[in-house]
Amino acid sequence: MAAFILGLLFFVTQSPPVPSWPADRSDARPSLSPPQADPLPLNDSSPSAHPNGTVQQLPGVIIIGVRKGGTRALIEMLSLHSAVAAAQNEVHFFDWESHFQRGLPWYLSQMPFSYPGQTTVEKTPAYFTSAKVPERVWRMNPDVKLLLILRDPTERVLSDYTQVYHNRLQKNKRMQPIESVLLQDGEINLGYRALNRSLYYVHIENWLRYFPLDSIHVVDGDQLIRDPLPEMQEVERFLELEPQINASNFYFNKTKGFYCLRDHGRERCLHDSKGRAHPRVDPSILQKLFRYFHEPNRKFFELVGRTFNWN
Ligand code: A3P
């Protein structure tokens, strides 16, 4: 008995507090250096209370990206749950220096008022691809839950291009045709930054240096478009929320070509800037993109221990 207790003690003291990984994926583990930075200070400034009993709370859940992955749809759908209070705007606290320098009290002041039992959620899609962000988020709260919504990397690039195209159009600026952005001398233009944002394994490695895989839930953005309910039910399970979101919360809007939301009888679709038509791309260029992303995708699947139905 004494030997058993001694053995147990030895095991407990020898087991390093490493994040949990998929059991059969140890080869995919990035080299970990234990996080060492100090927690971000909140300076005793207690959350500002509102007379109706609501308070501002730091987020317990952050939607970290990816840009054009379906982050707006995800936060709107999550807001259907009564235990969720979502920040309306993208806060850009951890990635913009001018915001980060204002400190956690400023971040807190950007959060919505919520009831004590509610969880606050914030989404800033640029967090996923910003290398300095994981450490900063970890310093705020190493137990925060992270949601990452991804789509087929090629589709995401086309969506990224379309967004920039429309932004420039609004400012009366011209935009190069998609072919000349994607290709240089007939080959994939590696200098096009939207491509880098679709190299998911590069970015997830940064997050896995700080957070265990079981703190990060990857939402399948292509599935969320096709059939949102099962994806949202998985999100509820991951966040340990009481199951509430149901089929009556969604209806397909033929004009928009996407699912829209029904909340206590009120129907609404996402803004027109969500669900835009993408430019037509020559199939031979698409093939080049699929080939370009093939190996990075495989690395990503290995890191998260899960595959996605991407080209
Ligand atoms: P496209 O406009 O290229 O189709 P984000 O909110 O991260 O910017 O992502 C925008 C993408 O969300 C849209 O890209 C769209 O495909 C996707 N999306 C997912 N569900 C949607 C929904 N129910 N309504 C509109 N867009 C949705």
Image (tube, helix red, strand yellow):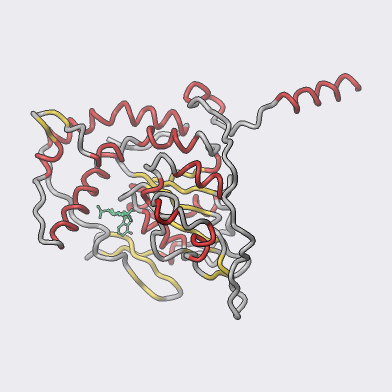
Residue 233 placement (x, y as % from top left) = 49, 54
Residue 218 placement (x, y as % from top left) = 44, 43
Give the left or right position of residue 68, taking residue 264 as reference. left
Identify the image quadrant of residue 16.
Answer: top right
Residue at 40 percent of width and 49 percent of height: 95
Residue at 85 percent of width and 22 percent of height: 6
Identify the image quadrant of residue 157.
Answer: top left
Q: Is residue 228 above or below residue 288?
A: below
Q: Extreme top residue here? A: 3
Where's the C terminus, which quadrant?
top left
Q: Extreme right residue here? A: 2
Q: Quadrant of ligand 1?
A: bottom left
Residue at 55 percent of width and 59 percent of height: 58
Residue 102 placement (x, y as % from top left) = 47, 58
Q: Say which of 141 and 311 sits in front.
A: 141
Q: Is residue 102 above or below residue 23?
A: below
Where's the N terminus, which quadrant?
top right
Residue at 39 percent of width and 75 percent of height: 266
What is the total number of numbered labels drawn onto the structure image? 0
Q: Is residue 119 above or below residue 292?
A: below
Residue 244 placement (x, y as % from top left) = 53, 63
Give the left or right position of residue 105, taking residue 166 as reference. right
